Image: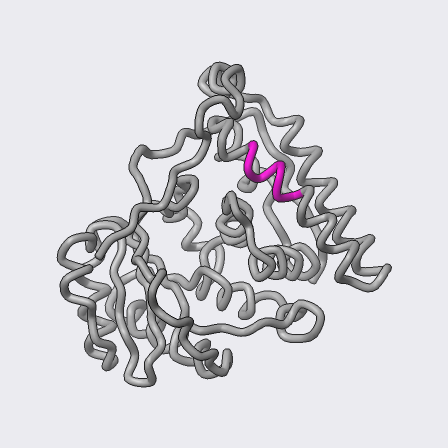
């Protein structure tokens, strides 16, 4: 796919408040990997069913990267998949739940009753999990994604998908793998990428650190030619980040640096 850019303007945007909700799986064994084509077929079925019902539902996470980036399907950026994640607009959790249950997925009723305003969990008959994000993406950092649902009929906006990978403070190899595949194959709207970073120093700081880790990962993992392409595209993103006008909020928070925790920490839920 051609690598083109929408350059950032001088506008910035703010993030919503609120902490993340994580299911605690510390004591549980990792679920077995599932054929990604089977997962993708199920995800497409659910997105299509939602669209037929008038609900915007989009795929995110690793399977979304698999869907849009051919490099994710072949070594050295091929990896395993055990579940998939969906997103719907705020207040649309009940509608999403009806669609997933009609498709044969079983809700985690206890978790969904407690946290369904922001996140829901379902289990497929085959045993894999489907997580549904409701409204704002909230993990280590918060990201508004609803206004990008029109960018792709299946996944969240590519810039948002990349940010959901680069916002992870303790980033793992699988997330660097996904980010590398996206930058090699997918057109990224640079303006959309830098927009949330211009108002949130913590988000900016995490992404800046992870782009450096991604460059090192690419140099160690890829053949010379794709490694150079990846490095060039990381450089373009980094340049755009450095050039975007920062809000007063960003500048005031930057003075504190890492002396104050700059990301949200996971909350374990039973």
Residue 54 horizontal/vertical position (percent): 26, 64
Outermost residue on the front side: it is: 27
The quarter of the picture where residue 181 lies is: bottom right
Residue 136 horizontal/vertical position (percent): 34, 45
Q: Locate residue 55 relative to residue 1 in the image: left or right.
A: left
Please report the residue visible at 42 percent of the width from the left and 71 percent of the height from the top: 30
Magenta segment includes 45 = no
Q: Is residue 29 above or below residue 22?
A: below
The quarter of the picture where residue 191 lies is: top right
Please report the residue visible at 14 percent of the width from the left and 62 percent of the height from the top: 110
Specify the quadrant that holds the N terminus: bottom right
State which region is magenta.
205-211
Magenta segment includes 207 = yes
Depth order, front residue of 151/113 = 113
Q: Is residue 111 above or below residue 79?
A: above
Q: Locate residue 254 relative to residue 17 in the image: left or right.
A: right
Residue 233 horizontal/vertical position (percent): 73, 47
Q: How many marks?
A: 0
Depth order, front residue of 44/212 = 212
Q: Locate residue 71 relative to residue 101 in the image: left or right.
A: right
Q: Locate residue 147 relative to residue 124 in the image: left or right.
A: right
Residue 143 horizontal/vertical position (percent): 42, 42
Please report the residue visible at 48 percent of the width from the left and 55 percent of the height from the top: 151
Q: Is residue 269 above or below residue 211?
A: below
Please report the residue visible at 79 percent of the width from the left and 56 percent of the height from the top: 227
């Amino acid at each position: 796919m051609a690598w083109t850019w929408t350059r950032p303007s001088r506008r910035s945007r703010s993030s919503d408040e609120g902490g993340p909700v994580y299911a605690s799986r510390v004591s549980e064994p990792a679920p077995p990997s599932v054929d990604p084509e089977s997962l993708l077929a199920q995800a497409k079925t659910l997105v299509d069913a939602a669209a037929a019902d008038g609900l915007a539902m989009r795929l995110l996470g690793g399977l979304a990267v698999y869907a849009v980036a051919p490099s994710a399907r072949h070594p050295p950026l091929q990896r395993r998949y055990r579940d998939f994640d969906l997103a719907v607009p705020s207040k649309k959790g009940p509608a999403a739940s009806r669609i997933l249950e009609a498709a044969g997925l079983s809700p985690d009723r206890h978790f969904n009753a407690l946290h369904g305003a922001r996140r829901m969990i379902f289990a497929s008959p085959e045993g894999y999990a489907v997580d549904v994000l409701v409204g704002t993406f909230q993990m280590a950092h918060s990201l508004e994604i609803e206004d990008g649902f029109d960018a792709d009929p299946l996944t969240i906006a590519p810039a948002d998908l990349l940010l959901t990978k680069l916002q992870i403070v303790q980033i793992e190899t699988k997330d660097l793998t996904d980010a590398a595949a996206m930058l090699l194959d997918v057109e990224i709207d640079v303006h959309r990428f830098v927009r949330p970073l211009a108002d949130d120093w913590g988000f900016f700081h995490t992404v800046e650190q992870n782009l450096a880790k991604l460059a090192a990962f690419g140099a160690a993992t890829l053949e010379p030619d794709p490694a150079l392409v990846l490095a060039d595209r990381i450089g373009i993103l980094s340049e755009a980040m450095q050039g975007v006008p920062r809000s007063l909020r960003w500048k005031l928070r930057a003075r504190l640096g890492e002396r104050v925790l700059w990301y949200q920490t996971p909350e374990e839920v039973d």
